[in-house]
Image: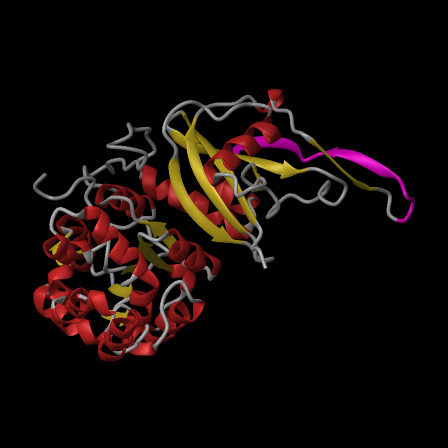
Amino acid sequence: MRIPTSAGILLYRFRDGRLEVLLGHPGGPFFGRKDLGNWSIPKGQRGPDNEDLEATARREFQEETGHPVPAGPLLDLGSIRQRGGKIVYAWAAEGDLDPAKATSNMIEFPWPPFTGRVKRFPEIDRVGWFGPEDARQRIKEAQIPFIERLETALGRSGQPGAFEGGPAVRLPSSDGQRGLVANRFKAVAFDIGGVLIDWNPRHLYRKIFGPDEVAMERFLTEVCTPEWNARLDAGRSFADAVAELIREHPSQADAIEAYRSRWDEMLGEAFEETVGILRELRRAHVPVYALSNWSAETYAVTRSRFPFLDELDGALISGDIGVGKPEPAIFREFLDRFGLVAESTVFIDDSSANVAVARSLGIEAIQFRSAGQVRRDLISRGFPLASHPPGS
């Protein structure tokens, strides 16, 4: 079943040095007399064909306010899950808008009930600017974290500031230190391969196939395939898997056997910038974990090569439980094993499929593209990290 997904924009401004956010009140007869706990960020349903979520947020903001999103960088506020199960993604944008000049698109539904008549109502009947405390009272309870994440990213000095190195914003507090607020996120989990460590079978097979990249890619696509490797990660023994594959491809026996006997040569170097983030979090007493697809037969070799893995507060690899990502079972086992709450846990993975499943379970998932991007995304969620890697 497809999970309902919406996206929206939280517009903010500073008036007399104080932060204000723009909220919309839902239109229609059901909400006419309802106020506290019913306002929302301007948002709406994701479009057809898996429309880009940021594009959805921009489109919905314009439809519901009559104004485009102001030019400039957006601050990623992550996602929340509403009571009905809908997942809402949000971005923050700095700008201004006159509530008296806001106009909303119209929606139709039967009214009055049982009359067969259809009436048109504005999707949002009014918008307004509110300070953070007032906004917390008015906005839907599930959306309160968006306001808190914005405050965390902007700081609580009450003064506007400039963007630093991208969309994540941190402002100095009155004592000159970077201001932090209580963070609802309590732990961070990292994928290993592709996030913390450069694991790639090509490190080995370039030695075996030499300059013949085409032959190497054909081998990794048709013989030792990603699907075959996934079964190793899920607990199948290397001995059985290699023996079976050699029977199917006897002419490639030596190259197949190397997948077992020379597996350690598939390990590249650690991604030091990401490891640096992990260590910064630990120094700030944030629990850090690993959740990864990895064979139990090779994990001991990996730990001996990369001692930082022993610094983790815990690790769950697919080979230990016989199921791998993106299966929901491994995420549930991870949360249960370490006593974590989905909504308080941030998970970082380079696979979009793994990120999507984690989010569907209520986990705050970030897709890894670079260490710098992850640093900014964690800062925007309230984690006590420096804006740039120490020493840079």
Question: Quick one: quadrant of the N terminus?
Answer: bottom right
Extreme residue toward the front, this view? 251
Q: Main SS of the magenta segment?
A: strand
Q: Residue at 59% across / 48% down in the picture?
A: 37
Q: Is residue 255 magenta?
A: no
Q: Is residue 132 visible?
A: no
Q: Position of residue 309 (x, y in %)?
A: 16, 65
- Of residues 219 and 74, the one nearer the viewer is 219
Quarter of the picture holding the C terminus: top left
Q: Quadrant of residue 335?
A: bottom left
Judge from the rendering whether residue 140 lies leftward or rightward of residue 348; answer left or right: right
Give the colour scheme of this rendering. secondary structure
Q: Residue at x 9, y 69 (%)?
A: 304
385 or 18: nearer the viewer: 385
Up/down of 253 relative to 383, above or below: below
* Figure quadrant of residue 228: bottom left
Judge from the rendering whether residue 242 lies leftward or rightward of residue 156; answer left or right. Answer: left
Q: Residue at x 32, y 34 (%)?
A: 167
Q: Position of residue 240 (x, y in %)?
A: 26, 79
What range of the chain is rendered magenta? Answer: 114-130
Q: Nearer the viewer, residue 151 or 210?
A: 210
